[in-house]
Amino acid sequence: MIMKTFSKVTIGILSLGIAATSAAEGDFTEISYAEAKGWQLDWHDEFDGKDVDEEKWGWEQNCWGGGNNELQCYTDRVKNSFLEDGKLIIR
């Protein structure tokens, strides 16, 4: 009896999580900056150029794990970060 109840509760919780995640993937209405009352925009990048704006963005380059002992190297290779369809792609 306890296992059946536990299973039903677990399935219910997982179902709610999946439903909430899939609902978040829909189309969103774009909000203009003027609509955010009480807030002031300090910085932004529209990513509308051909390349990443190096005056706004920089690349960490090292193999020291970014300060948290990750087993990886950070590079400035173009295939790792680039602009595509008005978005900054970071791989």
Image (tube, rainbow, N blue to C red):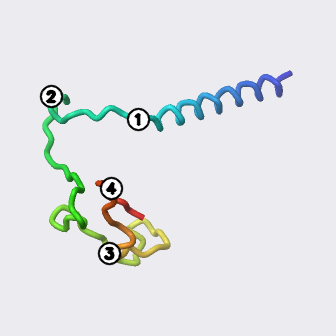
How far is disc 4 from disc 3 in space, using C-alphas?
Answer: 20 Å
Amino acid on which disc 3 is placed: Asp
Mark number, residue 76: 3
Circle 4 — which element?
loop
* Percent position of residue 42, x then y: 13, 45
User: Mark 4 near mark 2, Cβ–Cβ under 8 Å?
Assistant: no
Q: Residues within 10 Å of mark 2 (few under 14, many from 20)?
A: few
User: Nearer the N terminus, badge 4 or badge 2?
Assistant: 2
Above or below 34: residue 78: below
Amino acid on which disc 4 is placed: Asp
Q: Is residue 78 left or right of residue 46?
A: right
Residue tagged by mark 4? 85
How far is disc 2 from disc 1 in space, using C-alphas?
Answer: 26 Å
68 and 34: which is toward the camera: 34
Above or below 7: residue 41: below
Residue tagged by mark 2? 38
